[in-house]
Image (tube, rainbow, N blue to C red):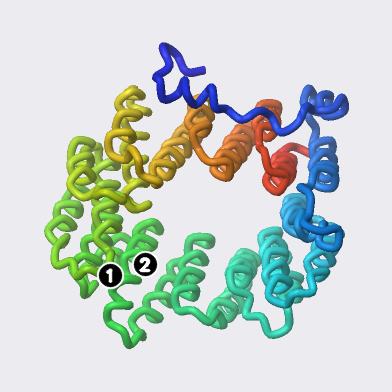
Amino acid sequence: MIRGRWSIWLMAAAIAAPAAAAPPDTGWQACRAAPTRDCVFAEAIGRMRDDAPPGRDPQFAEWDSLLYLRLSEIAAARKDRALFDEAKRSAEANQIADARRSALRWVAAAQAKAGFADDAARTLDDGDAGGFAAEEIALALARAGRPDDAVATAERLTSTEARLRTLTRLAQATRDPAYLDRALALVRGLDDGYEQSALRPGLALAYAELGQVEQAVRVARTTAVSYHRAQALAAIAAATRDAALLVEARSFATGFDGRGNEDEVWAALARAEVVLGVLPGARLTLEAHIGQTPSRALAAAVGELAAAHWLGGGKVAAEKLIDQLLAGSWTIGEARAVLARRLIAAERFDEARQVSFLADEITFDNLSAEIALKQAQTRAFAEALQSADKIQHPARRSPTLAEIAALMPP
């Protein structure tokens, strides 16, 4: 529990805390008291079928309940082809072509995450390039030791940004910089110089995260637009904790052309200052550039700074920081969500939960699920199940139970 006197901020959160989704039945109480993989999976499947929200019309009840989505997520946790077949039937039941195609993409993406890459490819509608599902299929192929098939799948994506993102994710998943070299060649081949420049910061960071720091810096320094160069160098500075690169990044944070990129650059600089422990500098950066309608990028950087204060013992300072910089802004929730996630990563679950009570319902459910899964990763399974019971929406609750079960010993 949080020690000492609660601030008004967290006292209000406690008052506003959502109740548990439903009182547990006797069987579930017994499972929570002595959880096993089998009983938690059984509960996940039972809830999936029993606690669906009402549909608009009996004809569409199965569709409205997002049954295909919950089935596919639970099937992924269990690696259960029979459940995937049921999910496909549910998705295919929709008569509207675009809706059916979208639903089948969700099923295919879940199949790919479970390692069933070929099944996933067959699930997609005929003629569908696959979108986000194709990205997951490419990752599954790479993890299965099929790099040529993975690259071929990535290159069939219709969007340059999607191809670049997928190649970057392939590199991250396999720790193989060869995928980044392909991505860099893709960027260099673009006719639009500004588009080339805008895509380089993410690529530079990906090289740095794989330990290819010299190449990362080369990519950053050869970025044509100065503020994109600043963003790239700041990201590398944060990844490598290199203060000299942060100074260099600041020198290029100029020449903004009104295309709306300033916030991304200042957020990257503030994040680097937080990582390097220059907290007063990060605050000055944020104060100087947060306007009347702060962007999500700047709000997220405020959350990072607040987390650094909180984890350093300055809980009250963290709360005040968020209120002072973002009061009245719709993006204040973004900062609080980032703060909560940093607390979850630090395994300070009670504090993360109190912060999450201030979030909207969807974010509260997502954070509750993240708390539950982190607890399960630390093998605190009983506590994880208690956290999962706080999730309000069935579409999030039953898959989270399945993910917890997947982390439990057989």
- Residue at the image point whose x is 84% and y is 24% from the top: 30
Tell which residue pokes out farthest to the front in this image.
57
- Residue at the image point whose x is 71% and y is 67% from the top: 103
Look at the numbered disc 2 and give the secondary structure of its residue: helix
Q: Which one is earlier in the sequence, the residue at label 1 or at label 2? A: 2
Q: Tell me which amino acid carries mark 1.
A: Val
In the picture, measured across the screen, residue 96 lies left or right of residue 321, that is: right
Coordinates of residue 158 in the picture (x, y in percent): 53, 82
- In the image, which disc is placed on residue 203? 2
Q: Tell me which amino acid carries mark 2.
A: Leu
User: In the picture shown, does residue 301 fall above or below 99?
Assistant: above
Q: Which of the two residues, 298 or 62, is positioned nearer the viewer here?
A: 62
Tell which residue pokes out farthest to the top in this image.
4
In the picture, measured across the screen, residue 1 lies left or right of residue 69, that is: left
The image quadrant that residue 138 belongs to is bottom right
Coordinates of residue 382 in the picture (x, y in percent): 70, 26
Q: CA distance from mark 1 to mark 2?
A: 8 Å
User: In the picture shown, does residue 13 fall above or below 214?
Assistant: above
Q: Within 10 angstroms of label 1, few (less than 14), some, or many (20 or more) residues? A: many
> Where's the C terminus, which quadrant?
top right
Instruction: Confirm whether residue 304 shows in the render.
Output: no
- In the image, which disc is placed on residue 219? 1
The image quadrant that residue 209 belongs to is bottom left
Coordinates of residue 267 in the picture (x, y in percent): 28, 51
Q: Are marks 1 and 2 in contact (CB under 8 Å)?
A: yes
Instruction: Confirm whether residue 273 shows in the render.
Output: yes
In the picture, measured across the screen, residue 251 lies left or right of residue 120, that is: left
User: In the picture shown, does residue 375 fall above or below 187?
Assistant: above
